[in-house]
């Protein structure tokens, strides 16, 4: 038999390697490698972001096929993996608007505006859900924010027309 270790015979070898790596972090920090935890976090963040992007792509495919529940499930997973990705919340809001889950949509839109208050799509989508729920004053306020952020976008103007039509 050769001197090579059969990895299949070693239970949990990956877990052991990870445990050793994690235990080295404080030692490397004490040794003056202050950048190591930052690099570790950046790599973990990049891996999560890549996985979240995969979930976004799966959600887009499901939505194109008309399977909004599956799309929403993928978007929820993406949002769990990368809670600060505004694109997840915006797409989640759009799917929930399509499903007419207005309260769920409002949660996603509010989260999008918290993550990136300079993204007009979040404000416009929030206003769309508010119009559907009859919350016209806050919808008007949020549409004004969306229009101020991006006056050339048509969506907030369309929602503004819907608002005036709904109010009568």
Image (tube, grey):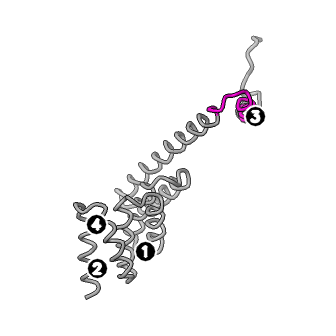
How far apart in space, not on screen, are marks 3 and 1 (Cα)?
47 Å
Answer with mark 2 or mark 3, whichever residue precedes in sequence.
Answer: 3
In percent of the image, x 47 and y 58: which residue is there? 115
Closer to us: 107 or 136: 136
Looking at the picture, tell me which residue is in the foreground, 8 or 99: 99
Image depth: mark 1 or mark 4 in front: 4
Q: Which mark is residue 147?
A: 4
Please report the bounds of the magenta region as a residue range.
20-36
- CA gap, disc 1 to disc 2? 15 Å
Image coordinates of residue 27 in percent, x first then y, are 75, 30
From the viewer's perspective, is residue 11 above or below residue 131? above
* Whole-percent x, y for residue 130 in the image: 39, 77
Quadrant location of residue 39?
Answer: top right
Tag on residue 148?
A: none
Q: At 72% from the left edge and 25% from the top edge, which residue is drawn?
A: 7
Q: Is residue 168 above or below residue 98?
A: below
Quarter that holds the C terminus:
bottom left
Residue 87 is situated, as x and y percent measured from the top left of the image, at 42, 54
Q: Which residue is mark 1?
A: 102
Which numbered disc covers residue 163? 2
In magenta segment, residue 141:
no
Separation of residues labelled 1 and 4 (CA atoms): 22 Å
């Amino acid at each position: 038999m050769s001197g090579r270790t059969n990895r299949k015979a070693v239970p949990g070898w990956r877990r052991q390697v990870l445990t050793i790596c994690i235990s080295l972090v404080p030692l490397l920090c004490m040794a003056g490698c202050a950048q190591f935890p930052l690099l570790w976090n950046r790599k973990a963040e990049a891996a999560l972001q890549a996985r979240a992007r995969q979930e976004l792509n799966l959600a887009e495919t499901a939505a194109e096929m008309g399977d909004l529940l599956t799309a929403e499930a993928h978007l929820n997973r993406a949002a769990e993996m990368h809670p600060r990705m505004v694109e997840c919340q915006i797409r989640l809001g759009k799917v929930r608007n399509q499903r007419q889950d207005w309260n769920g949509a409002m949660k996603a839109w509010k989260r999008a505006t918290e993550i990136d208050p300079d993204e007009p799509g979040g404000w416009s989508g929030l206003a769309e859900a508010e119009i559907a729920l009859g919350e016209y004053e806050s919808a008007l306020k949020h549409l004004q924010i969306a229009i101020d952020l991006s006056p050339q976008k048509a969506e907030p103007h369309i929602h503004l027309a819907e608002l005036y039509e709904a109010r009568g």
